[in-house]
Image (cartoon, rainbow, N blue to C red):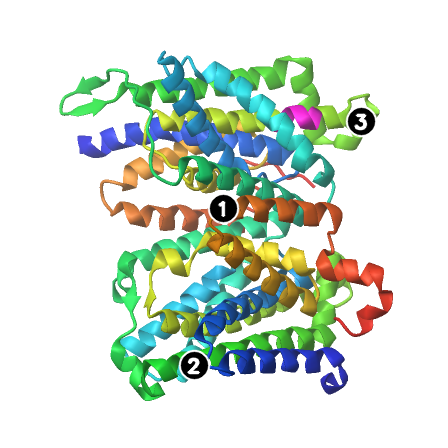
Amino acid sequence: MSGIFASMIDGLLIGSVYGLAAMGLSLIWGVMDVINLTHGAMIALGMFGMYLLFNATAINAYLLLAPMIAGGLILGVIIYWLAVNWVVDRPILMSLLSTFAVNMMVIGIGTAIWSTSPYNVDFSVPGITVGEYTFTGNHMFAALSAVLIALLLEMFLRRTRTGKAIRAVADNRDAAELMGISSTRVLMVAFAIGIALAVASGALVSTLFPFTILSGAGYQLKSFVVTVLAGLGKPFGALVAGVLLGLLEGAVSPFIAISWIPLIEFGLFVLVLIVFPRGIFSRATA
Amino acid sequence: MILRRPLLWLILLLAALFAWLPLHGNNVSLREDLILVALAIILTSNLNLMIGYTGYVNFGHIVFYGLGGYVGVYLMTVRGWHLVPSAVTAGFAVSLMALLFGLGILRLRGAYFALATIGVLVAVQSFVSNFEPWGRSTGMYVSFESYAPLGGPRHALWTTYFLIVAVMALSLILSLGIKASKFGLGLFAIREDEDAAIVLGVNATIYKAIIYSVSAFLPAVAGTLMFFKNGTIDPSIAFEFMLSLEGIVMLMLGGQGTVAGSALGGGLYERLRSYLLTSPRLSEFHLVIAGALLLLVIRLAPGGLIGWLYRLVPRSREVIE
């Protein structure tokens, strides 16, 4: 009995990292109606960025999150101008394809540099042992960092002028324009934050599990599931839904083979999409 | 009616060329090249029925091909069926399944539908990876006896090749036929404005479910043929997400919504990919080049090559549909 409990706690810790990844996707989707298919590639870049940075500096990996986020913001601005700005008001196919094109390029370059063999960040924080179960320090620090970043984002969106502008544009871009908000600038900032969140979550994952350049794809799919569960444009809801997904994984994994988990997750995903097309926690919007 | 359309004759000519060229001089390496081109054209033109005609992005189109392969290979190796009935049965089975899925997920619109198709792909792949009768993650092998009814392996590979060329021609003719029909006009109406189409009496739910199911049939048949030819099937090859996405690149490159565009894009991209993959210096960068190409196409020529041709020579619309 305590086995499932331990497994659920572990799921909860990992779930907060899923949630952080999904926050980035959800923010971009909600604000500019663009489904960012570079998401997985950005998570993978976060993993490799952390790997390079950690090997170069050898300081506490969780302190390296700050420069990783800064790098993510810059990367986000570049990708925004390369592939997103001109598809914002175009049919959804266009934005799907242009972000997907960037994804292919990043994965292609990454494969050429690092091939598809696994890497890991050799850093560990001592864990806590309760009875026969050990919760690793990395899992706890990663979860803590994820929640901290999520809180900072929520404060940014609620308290600062730019944050309020992002929420205004997400609500009604035309009205926001009439109030004197430059929507292009706001979209760019929101996109950059979304990418930075993906990079940060990738960096956190890299301290937990080994990874390859293709690992981002799995987390991208999980982010879709989480975003749809939470409803669009609700970054904090995405964090909660991520934790729920982690809990679910933790709760079922002692009982069934791990290879069945995608079937459960995506079965649930398709079902939720059909039954609640606008998300479980969502209000009705036009 | 359809007999008067010049493109029909071009399609038949293309198929005849595909059949004749490798046979001339028993050129097996050319046959292997052309079989991949034919497969690309089959997948792209059926994907076009969803994306180009109906305006619904299907990211998981490859699921039809993979499932078709599994059903067909299962029927042949375990049940001992002949190749042709296995392939046709696989087509019908996968179409039926698509119809059922379609009635569910086609209630979603736009991006939500696109995401649900990814969900379907991953869920099906995960199911097949755990499904005991289909060999779970190791997959299945085509037993050597399966080649016997077709006159031995050498003969069987040629037969399979001609069948794939025939499926390619059928795919293009199907696209052409649908484009001309009232049903096709209904699909175009859904693509342009689904609500308006419904108001004007197009039964959008049924139309979408039917086209989703129709677009599954020939890829599933092709799946059986290809995996029979390859001699083995496993979940990671059968449901390769990348191939599904590359299908979209091919379609955009050629020109979505046009019959000729799907053939042109499929053929060109497949040749480009083969060239890049076999070139010692560029093989590592084939994804980078494909990605850059896609970005350029949607930025500069959203109508693809055929859209560009239409702008250059407006009268070409009447011939190249």
Q: What is the secondary structure assignment of the residue under circle 1?
A: loop
Q: Does the stretch in magenta take in A190?
A: yes
Q: Toward which corner of the image does residue A127 lie, by quadrant?
A: top left
Tag nearer the camera, 2 or 1: 1
Name the amino acid type tagged 3: Glu
Q: Which mark, residue B158? A: 2
Q: What is the secondary structure assignment of the residue under circle 2?
A: helix
Q: What secondary structure do most residues of the magenta stretch adopt?
A: helix
Name the amino acid type tagged 1: Arg
* Residue receiving disc 1: B281
Q: CA distance from mark 2 to mark 1?
A: 33 Å
Tag nearer the camera, 1 or 3: 1
**Callout 1: few (<14), some (14-19), or many (20+) C-alpha neighbours within 10 Å?**
few
Residue A90 appears in the rendering: yes
* Residue receiving disc 3: A177
Q: Does the stretch in magenta take in B51?
A: no
Which span is picked out in magenta? Answer: A186-191
Chain ID at mark 3: A
Q: Which mark, residue B261? A: none
Same subunit, labels 1 and 3: the answer reads no
Which quarter of the figure is the C terminus of chain B placed in? bottom right
**Callout 2: few (<14), some (14-19), or many (20+) C-alpha neighbours within 10 Å?**
some
